[in-house]
Image (spheres, rainbow, N blue to C red):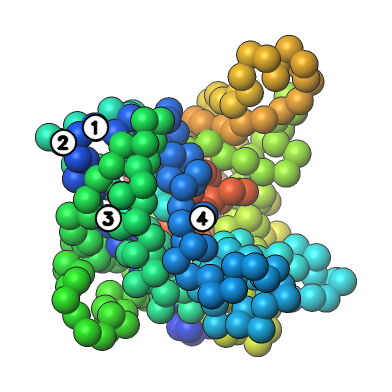
Amino acid sequence: MNEINTEQFENFRIVKYRFVLQPADFIKLSNFPGSSIRKIFLPVFKQLTCENPQIECKKCYKEEKCPFFVAVESENGFHDPDFKRYHTPPKPFIFDSPLRKKIFYTKNNKLYFDLILIGKTINYFPYFIATMRQIGEVGIGLNQGKYSLQKILALNLLDNTIAGEFDFNSENRNADNKWSFSLKELYDKYESEHEDIDEVTVSLVTPLRMKRLGNENWHLYFRTLTKNILTRIANLAIAYCDYNEILHFDNTIYRAGAVKIAKESLLWDDWRNSELRKRKPDSRMGGYYGNITYKGNIKEFWPILRIGEILHVGKNTTFGLGRIVIDAYHEDI
């Protein structure tokens, strides 16, 4: 029996925007575009939001109202020794770059990054806008290519269509929260997508990093995947969505163990340069790409997997790692 009551997801809100960038000349991104924005975003974001840069974040009296502290430095998890995995929450924002393997953009090509904001971070969206504009003046990518922020689109998470365009002249920027969705709305929609599912393929379209990942005997079991997504939801809820108690999904995670791996095709992407590989041949730095097909009673877990597409899985998701895409299969009758 499904223990998930979607009413408990009502206060968990998500919004997704698309920044459309116009290169001034050309921009050369790294092989993984997310790393190009990672190098420059955090220092610029802090520069624009921090009022006391000479003070350590944890000692600043404005920490609870500081966008940088809340979105980047906060460790406002659930501090109980029995719930160690909830102590340090994941970051409440995710940058997604285009999936196509394109790293060179000229002034004739527009570049875009999608931004997902969660919970209280939604109210900080104007700071993300200011940061992306400032980065355009500083430059991004391997050549520090400059760009202008042409427009911002709001995406409808229910059907992945364009819901509207952000008004740069709006006096009340928070009014654009009309484009956010509750996790309840998303879960209910995904739950109605299929009557029955007995097989699903999960594609790791950006590098996946997890604990104990990288050894030869590592496998992304369905229970591990389900637990990772649900734990991520619980962590984000209590840290950024004003939940007073941890959401528990123990029975759901247990039942996920009945779903088995039918086929697995994973490729390890090693990020070390040649010098580091020589010095530390046994170290494991990188992530997995590829596809995993699971077989079993998938119906109950379909909404969870679909939410995983939005929230990503694993570690270091803030700038695009751990992005998954789900394809369902039905048994022919």
**In the orientation shown, which residue stands out farthest toward the front?**
54
The earlier-in-sequence mark between 3 and 4 is: 3
Marks 4 and 1 in Cβ contact (< 8 Å) = no
Q: Which residue is mark 3?
A: 19
- Residue 97 placement, left or right of 274: left
The earlier-in-sequence mark between 4 and 1 is: 1
Q: Which residue is mark 2?
A: 107
Q: CA distance from mark 2 to mark 4?
A: 26 Å
Neighbor class of circle 4 (other Cα within 10 Å; few <14, some 14-19, many 20+) is: few
In the image, what residue type sits under mark 2? Lys
Q: Quadrant of the N terminus?
A: bottom right
Q: Is residue 68 visible?
A: yes
| Front residue (pair 222, 141) | 141
Above or below, 324 relative to 280: below
Q: Which residue is mark 4?
A: 42
The earlier-in-sequence mark between 1 and 3 is: 3
Q: Which mark is residue 26?
A: 1
